[in-house]
């Protein structure tokens, strides 16, 4: 829905649990809007169809889940290199390998650190509710166009499959630059080429500095995070996505028990909201990172907060039965609370 | 004075980087002539593949999207669906199309995407230094088949033009060569016919062009040119394999 309201009319995907609801929905809706839906022969083909459509300047997307995202990394790297916008929804699942379809945050590294070759970054957004999935999808298309960069929404089966109330909130796109780089058939104009090959002496280095500068601007301008009960917190719980939802309940329970605990939830995983987190962490003095993996985002948390802040971690590898309950997290919070 | 020969408008006035005796330049010219003839240069979006053909945008004066290795038909699908008014062709080598990109070519063809694929078959990976390709002939020595292609272990060379012609979405499939004036004229005719399919919106069209790679075959341009007729054409017969609308 968010994608359609953002003006996306082109979808290319391949079936994989737990995200097949997305292609099923769009296969029904896009033809009504004179859009194009293609069930591609593979994840690799789907991302390359997205590459082709994005090169024409239209808003387009794909979606998949972890093993499928692994296959898409080639195309994501090429899109990052050629500075093509495009939205990729990753309703991730557990692994490695075929793993399982349960809620998982095992793909934080893959998503945030540039899972393909070449040392690029993409924007990664981590919704924690159905409403946010919808809102951030629209935001993703804006960021993609504004920065000429692929944008990934990273969720899991909890966020991707749950049913919640949704307030439709279509909004005008941000003011966006003209796509003067998109191929269109040159007509009487100048030739346009969308490419990521730079062989001339110094060309590729300059291109990578240019990409690097873009990532710095993203860090400066586009970080998003949410805070809950952080004002007087002496322990700052930090979690994203589905785990943040459970953590919020645990934090509320801790508050009821009289513990001064707050929740810091990064919404952008790249750019990581370092400054906001560092402020909250310094005020609290202690940070507890909760993840549904054995410790990935915690590395970015440690880099973000000062040396004077104690950072602890609790996580479980994803898999059937490993999603922690609020009570379980409350016990962890109590242990870490000084 | 009547001008009888000139550079096609769709080609830039630049020298190519291709090796002496390589046929890419010739095939570029045939494609450019066809673009000119149909007057589609202004609305053409070419899709470059990985290999020697990647520099397409340096020689054709058209908009170009560069595709990852083998993915040109998928990229072209995205382009054509997003801009159905555009004229879209891919230009791919045999490693790109018949090995790493087999899934993409078969499914783009089977969907009947309204694009044209120019497939340059020189029985080797040119850019990477002459390794064995899916089209390498049995017995042919390459840098990764130093004892010659072994049918028992490496399989038989793939005849893509025939293979694709089996698919419902393919409207036109032909194999041509550029080793003699006669074959050149036939190649020109079939490339134009393939383009006509797209211009008329009549489905997927495919032209396989047998060409020489003297550098990686380790022979001089004259011997390389001769090999096309002596060794390649007997295995890869020339002609129109499918012409659904009899254009």
Image (cartoon, coloured by chain):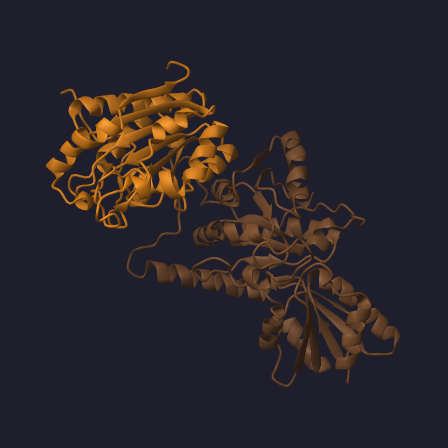
Residue B100: % across, % down: 39, 44
Q: Is residue A295 above or below residue A49?
A: below
Task: State the image quarter where residue A258 is shown.
Answer: bottom right
Chain letter for the brown part: A
**Number of numbered discs overlaid on the protein picture:** 0
| Residue at the (45%, 60%) spot, across then down | A211
Please name the residue shown 46% across and 54% down the image. A77
- State the image coordinates of residue B57 (x, y, percent, origin top left): 33, 42
Tell me, by letter, which chain the rendering colours orange: B
Residue A55 to residue A123: above or below: above
Task: Answer with left or right where residue A92 lies relative to residue A201.
Answer: right
Q: Quadrant of the C terminus of chain A?
A: bottom right
Which of B127/B34 is in front? B127
Report if residue A229 is visible in the image. no
Instruction: Tell which of A306 and A16 is nearer to you.
Output: A16
Q: Please give the name of the residue rendered at 64% of the width and 35% of the height, measured from the top-left corner.
A: A27
| Furthest-front residue in this view | B152
Query: Where residue A91 appears, x then y in whole percent?
Result: 64, 52
Most distant residue in the top direction: B246
């Amino acid at each position: 829905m968010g994608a359609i309201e953002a003006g996306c009319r082109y979808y290319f995907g391949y079936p994989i649990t737990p995200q097949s609801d997305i292609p099923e929905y769009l296969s029904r809706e896009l033809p009504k809007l004179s859009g194009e839906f293609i069930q591609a022969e593979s994840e690799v083909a789907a991302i390359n169809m997205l590459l082709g459509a994005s090169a024409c300047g239209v808003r387009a997307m794909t979606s998949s889940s972890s093993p499928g995202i692994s296959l898409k990394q080639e195309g994501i790297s090429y899109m990052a290199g050629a500075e093509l916008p495009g939205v990729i929804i990753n309703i991730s699942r557990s692994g490695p390998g075929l793993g399982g379809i349960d809620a998982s945050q095992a793909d934080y590294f893959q998503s945030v650190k540039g899972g393909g070759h070449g040392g690029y970054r993409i924007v990664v957004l981590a919704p924690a509710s159905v409403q946010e999935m919808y809102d951030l999808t629209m935001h993703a298309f804006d960021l993609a166009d504004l920065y000429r960069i692929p944008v990934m929404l990273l969720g899991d089966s909890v966020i991707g499959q749950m049913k919640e109330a949704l307030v439709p909130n279509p909004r005008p796109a941000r003011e966006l630059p003209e796509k003067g780089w998109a191929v269109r058939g040159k007509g009487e104009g100048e030739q346009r080429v969308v490419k990521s090959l730079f062989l001339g002496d110094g060309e590729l280095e300059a291109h990578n500095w240019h990409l690097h500068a873009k990532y710095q601007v993203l860090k400066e301008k586009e970080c998003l995070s949410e805070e809950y009960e952080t004002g007087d917190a002496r322990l700052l719980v930090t979690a994203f996505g589905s785990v943040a939802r459970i953590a919020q309940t645990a934090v509320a329970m801790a508050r009821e028990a009289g513990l001064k605990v707050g929740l810091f939830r990064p919404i952008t995983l790249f750019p990581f909201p370092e400054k906001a987190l560092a402020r909250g962490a310094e005020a609290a003095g202690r940070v507890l990172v909760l993840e549904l993996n054995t410790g990935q985002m915690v590395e970015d948390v440690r880099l973000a907060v000062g040396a004077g802040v104690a950072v602890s971690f609790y996580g479980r590898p994803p898999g059937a039965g490993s999603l922690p309950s609020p009570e379980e997290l409350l016990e962890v919070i109590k242990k870490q609370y000084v | 004075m009547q001008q009888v020969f000139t550079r096609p408008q769709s080609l830039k006035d630049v020298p190519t980087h291709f090796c002496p005796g390589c046929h890419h330049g010739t095939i570029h010219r045939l494609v450019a002539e066809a673009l000119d003839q149909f007057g589609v240069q202004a609305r053409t979006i070419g899709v470059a593949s990985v290999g020697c053909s990647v520099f397409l945008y340096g020689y054709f004066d058209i908009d170009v999207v560069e595709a990852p290795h083998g993915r040109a038909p998928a990229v072209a699908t995205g382009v054509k669906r997003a801009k159905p008014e555009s004229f879209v062709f891919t230009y791919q080598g045999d490693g790109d199309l018949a090995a790493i990109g087999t899934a993409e070519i078969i499914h783009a063809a089977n969907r009947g995407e309204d694009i044209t694929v120019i497939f340059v078959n020189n029985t080797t990976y040119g850019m990477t230094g002459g390794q064995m390709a899916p089209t390498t002939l049995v017995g042919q020595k390459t840098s990764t088949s130093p004892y010659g292609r072994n049918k028992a272990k490496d399989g038989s060379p793939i005849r893509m033009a025939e293979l694709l012609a089996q698919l419902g979405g393919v409207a036109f499939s032909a194999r041509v060569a550029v080793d003699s004036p006669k074959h050149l004229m036939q190649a020109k005719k079939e490339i134009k016919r393939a383009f006509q399919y797209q211009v008329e919106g009549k489905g997927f069209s495919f032209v396989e062009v047998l060409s020489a790679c003297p550098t990686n075959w380790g022979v001089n341009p004259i011997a390389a040119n001769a090999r096309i007729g002596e060794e390649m054409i007997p295995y890869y017969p020339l002609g129109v394999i499918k012409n659904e609308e009899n254009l």
